[in-house]
Image: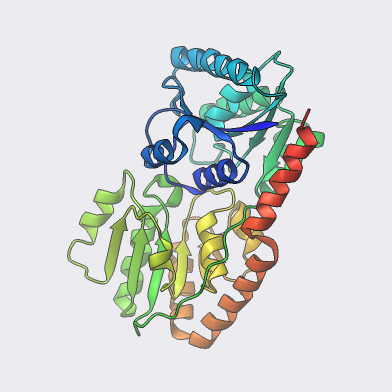
Amino acid sequence: MKTIQMMAKLERGGAQKILISLAENFDGLIISGMGGELFNAVRKNFGDRHIVIKELKREISPIDDILAIFRVREVLKNISKNHNGLILHTHGSKAGVIGALAPAGLKSVRVVHTAHGFAIHPYNSIIVNLVYLWLERLASMFRDLLIFPCETTRMKALMWKIGKEKQYRVVLNGVEIKKKSHSKSRKIIIGTVANFKPQKNPLLWADVVEEVLKRRDVKFVYCGGGPLFDYVRERFRDEKRVILTGWVDNPYTYMKDFSIFFLPSRWEGLPLALLEAMSLGIPPVVSNIDGNAEVVQDGETGFLCPLDDVECYVEKLLYLIDHPLLRSKIGGNAEKVITKRYTMEKMLNGYRDIYKEVAI
């Protein structure tokens, strides 16, 4: 069966990296809307295997959303003429809904959806959360399988009655295991790889950085871009110990020299940047949420802090700065966890099993 990966917008992020890896490894097609930092690269690398539907947008737009359903349906009908069956694999909330409804009644199409992280969280209004919940429940009525990157996300879906438990499968996110490097710099480097959106909490990141720099002479590096980038850059305009790289094609060039990984996200599924850092033996200090808490054992493979708790983040970072042997021990423990459970090979094998299961 032919696999088709579908996402509304090809921005930089973990879900997009997984989508591209699946399309590459399973010789699949990609359906997306316009725009996003990765759009041009995907267009170049996949050529006619990348199908663009301009009406497919992340934002809610009733007219475009209805048109997108019909456009996707037409694409699926055309592709199915040359294949015995199709697997439409959707990623992200909007593509998940459009992709569930578009093939309704097409017997040659199987639909699976990876819930990289639900858009239902305390930072939305009750009305917005109820709308998202209703849409997720509706879409799950038309899906064959619902896939989760970690057990915590699966439990949320069960609690919120999104789909049926018999539809659920867990395929842990995985990363390529790369060679470690030893930084030539004697200064401690505390690194972050994330976008500058509210989800990743860059404003709280800035608060923590200011407090740590008052007490220790270390360097902070933040790899990523986004809507809050300019604000944070202006805040640290005169601080040479803070480096904001903007978007980089290969964050590994910076990450390999990190002494500590810091990510104070407000909500997550299971962030690839965290797995990549841990795979390099870098001890993490992260928020105590969903997938983070599943992969990080507090005090053993990293440190967890309550949401928006500046004092906790500062305390844990200072503790790791002051205890190099502990950094090494926790980093080693973190590396073992990733190489055992969260590799790219294991993730691809998991999705291969999913595709075999739903194949016609």
Q: Nearer the viewer, residue 305 or 136?
A: 136
Relative to 303, does residue 48 appear above or below in the rendering? above
Left or right, residue 293 beside residue 33: right
Which residue is at a point 64% across and 33% down the rendered structure image?
3
Q: Residue 145, can we see it?
A: yes
On the image, which quarter does residue 206 sit in?
bottom left
Q: What is the basis of the colouring in this image?
A: rainbow
Question: Which quadrant of the rendered structure holds the N terminus?
Answer: top right
Image coordinates of residue 158 in percent, x first then y, are 74, 38
On the image, which quarter does residue 255 sit in?
bottom left
Image coordinates of residue 357 in percent, x first then y, are 79, 37
Left or right, residue 206 beside residue 271: left
Which residue is at a point 70% across and 15% down the rendered structure image?
106
Q: Nearer the viewer, residue 356 or 246?
A: 356
Image coordinates of residue 240 in percent, x first then y, are 22, 70
Question: Which quadrant of the rendered structure holds the C terminus?
Answer: top right
Relative to 181, does residue 305 appear above or below in the rendering? above
Query: Count the marks: how many?
Result: 0
Residue that lies at the very extreme toward the right in this rendered image:
166
Q: Residue 151, can we see it?
A: no
Which residue is at a point 73% across and 38% down the rendered structure image?
355
On the image, which quarter does residue 331 sit in?
bottom right
